[in-house]
Amino acid sequence: MDITPVDPTEALPVIRAYYADIIGRYHGRPATPAEIEQTMRDEPSDDLVMLIARDGNEILGCVGLDFHIPPFAEVKRMYVLPDARGRGVGQALLAAAEKVAREHDAVTMRLDTRRDLVEAIALYRKTGYVEVEQFSEGMYIDHSFAKDLVYVTAAEPDDIRLKALIAELDQELRGRYNDEAIGPMPITSEVRFALAFRGQEPIGCVAVQPKGDVDFELKRMFVLPAARGTGIAPLLLDAAEATVRAAGGRRIVLETGIRQPEAIRLYEKFGYTRIPNFPPYDQDPLSVCYAKVVAD
């Protein structure tokens, strides 16, 4: 399955099928061509960012995004053709739409729908959308949903949100290692930090700092406990690796501890391999070190 942006005019056939479906459901009879064309004139799609899902030459569905009210991305024309249902197309379209929304600096997805579109409501709930107060006017709106997007952005070392996350990380490490010394991280101009957000809430952080000519050390990798298991850590790792590549680095090295099994599992899952402990961890029995080549 491929999902690609298209000119709204290219999406008109599937948009027409979308309106035929929802108009027919509302009236309990097939929609007439005149009703479909009138609705398309009343609700034009030419100002939307449209995505189409295809399997080869077969069109499977579409979704549109309206960015006119920042920082929101409003989902429009979300539709999967009947023959393509049950194949994960709806989830894939929403995931692609969320990626495009992040690229447009949106922080929250939102949408409205009707009560009779039960499969759409089930899809939104399944993919993390929560019901919210109605945010727009319309006689056909029965439910409104929203989802705060997760994104990663660069941060300055004096960012108070970053400092708060690092303080929570240090507190957690002291608890795991029985209050054994958790040394402060030296901050230099070469250290690059990033923050992960859900909506406008900071939920994780990471840093990389140069270590030799082509190596960077991963530091201060942390996700708030309430946000763990939701895909935040891989986003932070991706951001760290992209930062290293952009800086001309070739390899990431890192140190973690034997009392952090979830961190060890994460690094091994994403291609980090065990290496001999490097200074200053070479004499620490609680430390384990890993590395990953991220650029040729």
Image: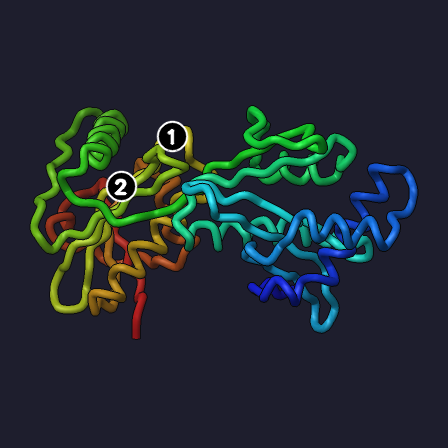
Left or right, residue 243 beside residue 53: left
Left or right, residue 6 beside residue 107: right
Whether pointer 2 and pointer 1 mark residues with C-beta atoms closer than 8 Å, the reply is no
- Residue 149 is situated, as x and y percent measured from the top left of the image, at 45, 41
**In the image shown, does 291 or 134 lie closer to the viewer?**
134
Per the image, the residue denoted by label 2 is 257
The quarter of the rendered structure image containing the C terminus is bottom left
Query: In the figure, 260 relative to 39: above or below?
Result: above
- For image coordinates 72% across by 33% down, the residue present is 140
- Residue 194 is situated, as x and y percent measured from the top left of the image, at 26, 47
Q: Quadrant of residue 12?
A: bottom right
- For image coordinates 25% across by 25% down, the residue present is 175
For badge 2, the amino acid type reads Gly
- Residue 278 is situated, as x and y percent measured from the top left of the image, at 16, 55
User: Would you call the spot at circle 1 few (<14 residues within 10 Å), some (14-19), or many (20 or more)?
Assistant: few
Per the image, the residue denoted by label 1 is 225
**In the image shown, does 2 or 288 lie closer to the viewer?**
2
> Which numbered disc, 2 or 1, marks the residue that appears first in the sequence?
1
C-alpha distance separating marks 2 and 1: 18 Å
For badge 1, the amino acid type reads Pro
